[in-house]
Image (tube, rainbow, N blue to C red):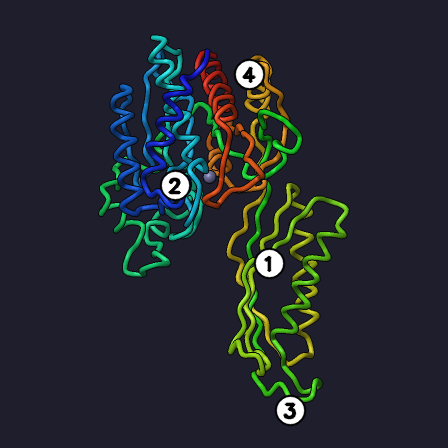
Amino acid sequence: MKINIQRLMQNIERYAQIGKTGEIGVERITLSDEDKQARDLLKSQMTAAGLEIYVDEIGNMIGLRRGRQDVPPVAMGSHLDTVYQGGRYDGALGVLAGLEAIQTLNDEGIETEKPIALINFTNEEGVNYAPDMMGSHAFAQLGDLGKILASQSYDDPTKSVDSELQRIGYKGDLKCGDFPLDSFIELHIEQGPVLELEGTDIGAVEMVQGIYWTRYTIQGQANHAGTTPLQYRKDAGYAASEIIKFAGDYVRNSPTQILSTVGTISFEPNAINIVPDKATFTLDLRSVNLETLKDGQEAIDNFANDIIQNSGLSLERDEMVRFSPVQFDDGVVSLIADKAGELGLSVKRMPSGAGHDAQMMASVCPTAMVFVPSVNGISHNVNEFTKEEDLENGANVLLNACFELANR
Ligand SMILES: [Zn+2]
């Protein structure tokens, strides 16, 4: 069975107009007016496709296509929100390909044994409200819902997730977690270069890397850059640079797979001729292996403590995120690989380097992901692009894998 690629392309184009930026980019921040507009469009398309619509307390939208049996549905989905200056495929592809799969079943007049659900998760990106993967996190009942709803906008602290959900009309009454699922598959662009570089059509995603985010704040003493002898300095900037260098060297010398990134840094008072009294930087540490991740974090923290000791400096660590690696369901991963093979596509079993809603759903039901290639591996960027042929391949794998799950 094959999806209608013309219809899918038209639909991707249609959503890309909502929050359009640059030539092909999209900026559709969660709970914004653009998010509401995209949600309204999805709601009308779900209704037109004959789906029953449910909205839960965190604003996740669920469209349900009934099956012969009244049992938990096989679900597909992803997210319609984007980062600032984002692309048109990250998230939207998984929602729109899921809709296309359902429209294809409708076209063919096919009834499945189990129902099929399509989900649009709230705030996957987390750019304006923490935490990221918020909707799936709440769906899987992994956090304190009250706290999540109270999360304030970085842009405007008078706004909360709760107030904005009400404002855009997507504060639903379905209790989070009150929607059991049979299984879940998320189609997503790879957002990395591996599939393209290896000339592979489809990624059958076996797991998601663990992610640790830590913010380090080093406090020292501001002083004159010319008159303060080195032994009397409390130089927060120099200490920060030593820790950053260590984190980079550590992962480069590690025998097991681990990545470190220091993506933000700030000095105070941030002047050319003043020894900085404060340095703040963030560390993003990732690995597919939990032990490797823990060991790396510990080594970097130990080194930071050593640097600080006897230096007159003080160090604060804020553990912003601690997500362990998530293993997907081997049966669903194999099914995805088999369906790709049946469609004549090449397939690679691979981990995901980025976080996704599917990693939260893995705690709810058997879950896996389908990846399609990203041109030049570019994502979270207005130039994010995936070829039409690859979009079609991914949507066909999604359709056929879900169809099989729904008839088991
Ligand atoms: Zn995404």
Question: Between marks 1 and 4, how big is the CA–CA gap?
Answer: 39 Å
- Labelled pair 3, 2 in contact (Cβ < 8 Å): no
Amino acid on which the number 2 mark rests in the picture: Gly
Question: Between marks 3 and 2, how big is the CA–CA gap?
Answer: 54 Å
- Say which label, 3 or 4, has the lower sequence index: 3
Measuring 38% from the left and 28% from the top, which residue is drawn there?
Answer: 96
- Labelled pair 3, 1 in contact (Cβ < 8 Å): no
Q: Position of residue 400 (x, y in %)?
A: 48, 16
Amino acid on which the number 1 mark rests in the picture: Val
Q: Name the residue under label 1.
A: 262
SS type, badge 1: loop
Measuring 48% from the left and 45% from the top, which residue is drawn there?
Answer: 380
- Say which label, 1 or 4, has the lower sequence index: 1
Q: In the visual, does 183 lie left or right of 110?
A: right
Amino acid on which the number 3 mark rests in the picture: Thr
Which dot, 2 or 4, sits closer to the camera?
Answer: 4
- Labelled pair 1, 4 in contact (Cβ < 8 Å): no
| Residue most extreme to the front | 23
SS type, badge 4: helix
Q: Mark 4 points at which residue?
A: 339
Amino acid on which the number 4 mark rests in the picture: Lys
Question: Between marks 3 and 1, how big is the CA–CA gap?
Answer: 31 Å
- Say which label, 3 or 1, has the lower sequence index: 3
- Say which label, 2 or 1, has the lower sequence index: 2
| Above/below status of 378 relative to 8 | below
Which dot, 3 or 1, sits closer to the camera?
Answer: 3
Q: Mark 3 points at which residue?
A: 227
Q: In the visual, does 206 lie left or right of 112?
A: right
- Say which label, 2 or 4, has the lower sequence index: 2
Q: Residues within 10 Å of mark 1 (few under 14, many from 20)?
A: some
Q: Name the residue under label 2.
A: 135
